[in-house]
Amino acid sequence: MQKEMANKQEKSEEIANKPGKKGFARLLAATSYSSQGLVAAWRNEEAFRQEVIAACLMLPLALWAGETPTERAILIAAVMFVLPIELINSAIEATVDRIGPEKHPLAKIAKDTGSAAVAVALFAAFLVWCCILIPKLPI
């Protein structure tokens, strides 16, 4: 038991002390990797492009439709919440595709679950917008 704990401690220290960039250089590298990921998602994922275009249309609408700064922030956050979920879904799909082209039940579960996460985020954004905007309708 103590030997296992010591091994886990050593591995934890190896991870914490991994070689590589530190400080500002690490921040610059991370920013570069993030930019590359956004470009890859834009080039390769139609759903991401559609959601970015929808966000570009909805963000000005949120600024116009929200009556208070809080409403505006909530509307904007609801729209922006979808994009990172889509990026994670794209990463899951790319990883599963990298493993191999053959069909496997676990690959299907991974892809379907990622897709479900996007659907839940979209539905949540829809509900937020409805909750804020429907009471304002002149009915």
Image: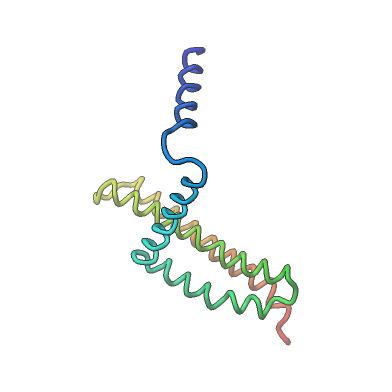
Say left or right for 102 vs 106. Answer: left
Tell me if 58 is positioned left or right of 106 in this view: right
Marker count (numbered): 0
Q: Nearer the viewer, residue 78 or 32?
A: 32
Q: Quadrant of residue 40?
A: bottom left
Choose top left, top right, bottom left or bottom right for residue 124: bottom right
Nearest the eye: 12 or 17: 17
Instruction: State the residue in front, 46 or 129.
Output: 46
In the rendered image, the vertical position of residue 54 relative to residue 139, given as above or below: above
Name which residue lies at 73% across and 68% down: 70
Picture coordinates of residue 52, whole percent (x, y): 47, 70
Q: Residue at x 47, y 54 (%)?
A: 31
Give how far across and how far down residue 33 sits, in percent: 41, 53
Q: Is residue 93 above or below residue 5?
A: below
Of all residues, the one furthest to the top in this rendering is 2
Locate the C terminus by quadrant: bottom right
Residue furthest to the right in view is 68
The x and y percentages for residue 66 are 70, 76
User: What color scheme is it?
Assistant: rainbow
